[in-house]
Image (cartoon, helix red, strand yellow):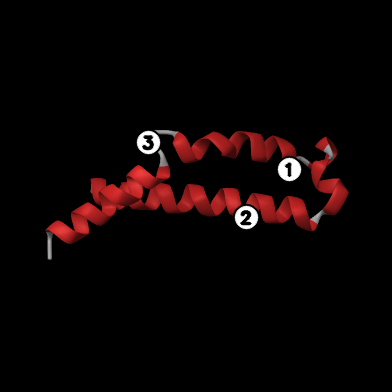
Amino acid sequence: MHCLSSGLKAFCGEQATVLIETCRRSCGGHGYSHASGIPKIAATMAPVVTYEGENTVLFLQTARYGSSNL
């Protein structure tokens, strides 16, 4: 369970931050406007990649589990 939750948390957090940045860039100057809501979402999601361990550590835990069970 730890292997799956570590990998899923790291993957989803990373993808969410990438997609939020893509949305902000797609909106041009409006993406920076607080009226769009994107800056608030970006500020909320930015620390997610470090909660409960930095994503690199979580990906390594998942990889370690996979390589030890070969």
Q: How many dots with numbers?
A: 3
Percent coordinates x, y for residue 69 in the rendering? 12, 60
Percent coordinates x, y for residue 33 in the rendering? 84, 39
Instruction: For the C terminus, give its image quadrant.
Output: bottom left
Q: Which mark is residue 19?
A: 2
Q: Is residue 69 left or right of residue 13?
A: left
Q: CA distance from mark 3 to mark 2?
A: 21 Å
Of marks 3 and 2, the one in the foreground: 3
What residue sits 84% from the left and 53% below the top? Answer: 28
Identify residue type, mark 2: Leu
Q: CA distance from mark 1 to mark 2?
A: 11 Å
Q: N-terminal of the two: label 1 or label 3?
A: 1
Q: Which residue matches tag 1?
A: 38
Of marks 1 and 3, the one in the foreground: 3
Tag 1 and tag 2, C-beta contact below 8 Å: no
Find numbered disc 3 in the image and state the secondary structure of the residue it sits on: loop
Q: Which residue matches tag 3?
A: 53
What residue sits 60% from the left and 53% below the top? Answer: 18
What residue sits 76% from the left and 40% below the top? Answer: 37
Identify residue type, mark 1: Ile
Find numbered disc 2 in the image and state the secondary structure of the residue it sits on: helix
Q: Is residue 70 left or right of residue 58?
A: left
